[in-house]
Amino acid sequence: MTAALDESSNTLKGILMIVGAGALLASMDGIGKHLMSDNPVPVVIWARYFFHALVTFIFLSARGSLGFLRANRPGLQTLRAVLLLFATGTMYYAISLMPLANATAVQFLAPVLVTAFSVPILGETVGFRRWAAVVAGFFGVVMIVRPGFGQLEWVSVLPLLTAICLSLYMIMTRIMRTMDRADTTTFYSTATGTIVLSALLPLFWETPDSNSWMLMMIMGSAGAMGHYLLIRGFSCASASFLAPFSYFHLLSSLPISLFFFGDVPDAWMLGGTTLIIGSGLYVWFRESFSRR
């Protein structure tokens, strides 16, 4: 009885952490979109990485050990971090030019793309039904961006590039999960981007005002806390059970986009979002079923 209650309590904690992470990450993107109206996009991306890395370093080093700085496979860690950097860069350029909720919805094609890329990269076998889910997800993207119907083609491609980079990042995470400590992987994810962007920063630098600095610190801290809650949440219950709750990030972006930026979702956007979520949930269901 006690064991069952403990398991139920851990599951609830996991759900709340994943939901909280989704709200924090959507808020981080919303703050980033606001900041990019007054600051260069690369400066905002740098701040998002710098303060995220700073908070992560302080938190991990407070445990009394700097072992997280040593990676067994630094080359693979760097490659994985660069994929995340490209995903962040394309996403932030996207949300600076298009509604936050639309870009976030397309980004969530990434879990579906993992299915497609796992065939050539991981050698996995994917059946007809999961391929159909991949196609449905792409139809959802087309419904949202509607290339050729009033939106710039290249802008519409940006969140799709985000999804591609994120899916490859997820596959790299699968490959590396037994190679390094989770703390090491977490730190490399932000430190690599911070180093790269700091080297390029003189090309784009414009000094933010005091209000922007404050928002940048909040943005980076929200990102650090959101990623921490994701890691803690998935340690409380099975990933297969918690995965659907990750879509709260997407759902959180809708009211932020509406109330803070005045972007009213139309029927095409809502229909496309439903297709993307549906295809992602179907892939999750099929993968969970096949593991039983």
Image: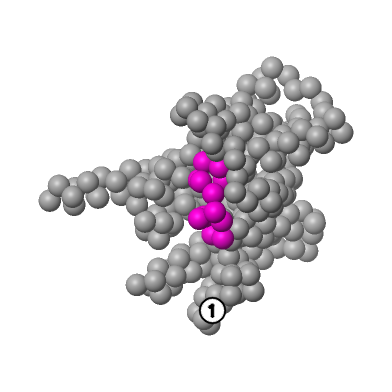
- Horizontally, is 88 left or right of 134 in the view? right
Q: Is residue 34 above or below residue 250?
A: above
* Percent position of residue 62, x then y: 48, 26
* Percent position of residue 180, x then y: 54, 49
The residue under the point 64% across, 63% down is 141
Q: Nearer the viewer, residue 26 or 14?
A: 14
**Residue type for callout 1:** Thr
Is residue 94 on the magenta stretch? no
| Numbered marks: total | 1
- Tell me where residue 43 sits by quadrant: top right
Q: Main secondary structure of the magenta part?
A: helix
Color scheme of the displayed model = one colour
The residue under the point 73% across, 19% down is 209
- Horizontally, is 141 left or right of 157 in the view? left
In this orientation, does residue 246 appear?
yes
Tell me the magenta residue range: 174-186
Most distant residue in the bottom direction: 128
Q: Kindly state the secondary structure of the residue where label 1 is placed.
A: loop
**How many residues crowd mark 1 within 10 Å: few (<14), some (14–19), many (20+)?**
few
The residue under the point 60% across, 66% down is 113
In this orientation, does residue 139 appear?
no
Most distant residue in the right direction: 203
Instruction: Locate the C terminus by quadrant.
Output: bottom left
Q: Is residue 193 above or below residue 160?
A: above
Most distant residue in the top direction: 210
* Percent position of residue 270, x then y: 55, 58
Which residue is the site of mark 1?
125
The residue under the point 50% across, 55% down is 178
Q: Nearer the viewer, residue 282 or 62?
A: 62
* Percent position of residue 69, x then y: 59, 37
Q: Nearer the viewer, residue 199 or 134?
A: 199
- Tell me where residue 114 sits by quadrant: bottom right
